Structure formats: structure tokens, C-alpha cells
Image (cartoon, rainbow, N blue to C red):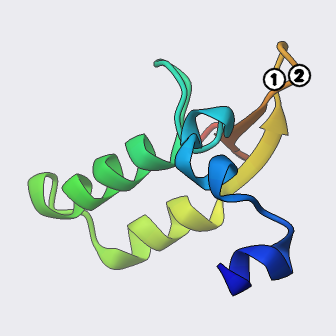
Amino acid sequence: MRELKKLGITVAEVEDYKIYTIADNPGPQLSSDRLEYTLSSGSRLWNMELVELKEMYDDLEIFTNEKQEQEIGFKTKEL
């Protein structure tokens, strides 16, 4: 609780993670939970090297979408 207070975050804001579009949003938008399980699966299912996964993580950026919501995206299309 003390840490939340320091950050100016209420318990209600933590409980309702759906208010954070970056944490949870409908597909096909990218969200942190979807990104986490996709890339962690990539290392096992598609034999992706850690250097490839790091390259993807390093290419992430937060954008504002057409609904004026924050959304995770990639800086480059090549990835």
C-alpha cells in the first residue's frame, strides 16, 4: 500500500486492470499480456534465439491509436 501511495495509484486502479489499454485490450491490438505469452512461446515453439526476442522487445513503443488510447506497437515494420 505504501508503494502505491508513493506512485499515486489507488487499490481500485490496480484491481481494474482493464482501464489500462496497454495491459488488456481486444485483439487484434497488442497488449502486454498477449505480447508476453506470444514472445515467451516463440522461444520454445519457434526456436527463437534470445537475441531475436530482445530485438523485438527493444523495438516496442507506446503509441496513441485512433481511439486516443495508448497501444503497444513496433517502431519498424520489418519485425
At 52% from the left and 59% from the top, the residue drawn is 56
Residue 65 bears which disc, if any?
1
Q: Quadrant of the N terminus?
A: bottom right
Q: Nearer the viewer, mark 2 or mark 1?
A: 2
Few, some or many residues within 10 Å of mark 2 (<14, 14–19, 20+): few
Above or below for 69 versus 20: above
x then y, percent, for residue 36: 38, 55
Of helix, strand and loop, which one carries label 2? loop
Above or below for 56 versus 38: below
Gap between marks 2 and 1 measured at Cα: 5 Å
Of helix, strand and loop, which one carries label 1? loop
| Residues under numbered marks 2 and 1 in contact, where contact means CB atoms less than 8 Å apart | yes
Few, some or many residues within 10 Å of mark 1 (<14, 14–19, 20+): few
Q: Nearer the viewer, residue 1 or 19?
A: 1
The picture quadrant where one finds residue 20 is: top right
* Residue found farthest to the top: 67
Q: Label 2 belongs to which residue?
A: 68
Q: Amino acid at mark 2?
A: Gln
x then y, percent, for residue 29: 56, 24
Residue 10 bears which disc, if any?
none
Question: In this rendering, does residue 45 appear at all?
Answer: yes
Question: In this rendering, does residue 79 appear at all?
Answer: no
At 40% from the left and 41% from the top, the residue drawn is 34
Tag count: 2
Q: Would residue 7 appear left or right of 57 to someone viewing this image?
A: right
Q: Would residue 64 appear left or right of 59 to someone viewing this image?
A: right
Q: Nearer the viewer, residue 68 or 48?
A: 68
x then y, percent, for residue 73: 66, 40
At 74% from the left and 52% from the top, the residue drawn is 61
Q: Would residue 39 appear left or right of 64 to someone viewing this image?
A: left
x then y, percent, for residue 16: 57, 40
Q: Amino acid at mark 1?
A: Asn
